[in-house]
Amino acid sequence: MPYIKQESRPEVDKIYDMMIGNNVDINDISEIMNQFCEKNIEPSYNNYKNFFAEINECCKEVERRMDLECDMNYAEEVDIRRKCVLSSIVACMDILKVNGDLNYLLYRYIYNSHEEFRSSICDILLGAVDHLRGRYLAPYEDEKIKENGDVT
């Protein structure tokens, strides 16, 4: 992804060239990530979450560029009265931090939901992440492409 400025890319490109030169295939990627995590990620819940999120964001950006991401308009699907109720819940969420508080709330909500709905709730949350990613991160990605040049 284009976060790395052009002048900083040659060092990372050396690693890419090494991967290509050693015929790293899709089965090797998991082991590379495992070893990288063991060696470079200082053990903590947030560090692991950030590491996993970085991998996830890379994959999501590939999907976005391949035009596979779904175009969902959640806002239009929620009626006005329901939006007011949901807004009052969101107003109470100001106390939450995205350092475990949100994870706890969502997990508790899902865990205490009827068993047959748990998977669907997770699917909806993941769909919401895709929607939010397209809304908030995609413009940032596009700006960084303009600023730093695209990855080739």
Image (spheres, rainbow, N blue to C red):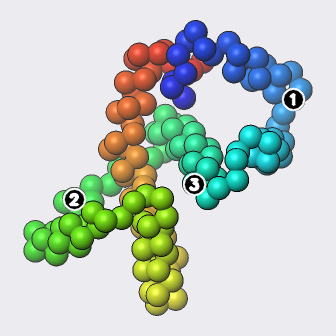
Q: Secondary structure at mark 2?
A: helix
Task: Please provide percent x and percent y for residue 29.
Answer: 78, 42
Query: What type is the residue that disc 3 sits on?
Result: Asn
Query: What type is the residue that disc 1 sits on?
Result: Asn
Task: Please provide percent x and percent y for residue 152.
Answer: 60, 18
Q: Name which residue lies at 45% across and 47% down.
A: 69
Q: Is residue 40 above or below residue 93?
A: above
**Marker disc for residue 23:** 1
Task: Please provide percent x and percent y for residue 53.
Answer: 56, 48
Q: Is residue 110 visible?
A: yes
Q: Looking at the image, is mark 3 or mark 1 nearer the viewer?
A: 3
Q: Residues within 10 Å of mark 1 (few under 14, many from 20)?
A: few
* Left or right placement of residue 2 versus residue 16 in this view: left
Quadrant for residue 88, please give it: bottom left
Which of 47 and 136 lies nearest the eye of the viewer?
Answer: 47
**Marker disc for residue 75:** 2
Query: What type is the residue that disc 2 sits on?
Result: Ala
Q: Name which residue lies at 27% across and 63% down.
A: 94
Cα distance between the residues tagged 2 and 3: 30 Å
Q: Is residue 87 above or below residue 44?
A: below
Quick one: label 1 or label 2, which is nearer the N terminus?
1
Residue that label 3 marks: 46
* Left or right placement of residue 62 versus residue 102 in this view: right
Of the 4 image quadrants, the one containing the N terminus is top right
Pointers 2 and 3 in contact (C-beta within 8 Å): no
Q: Residues within 10 Å of mark 3 (few under 14, many from 20)?
A: few
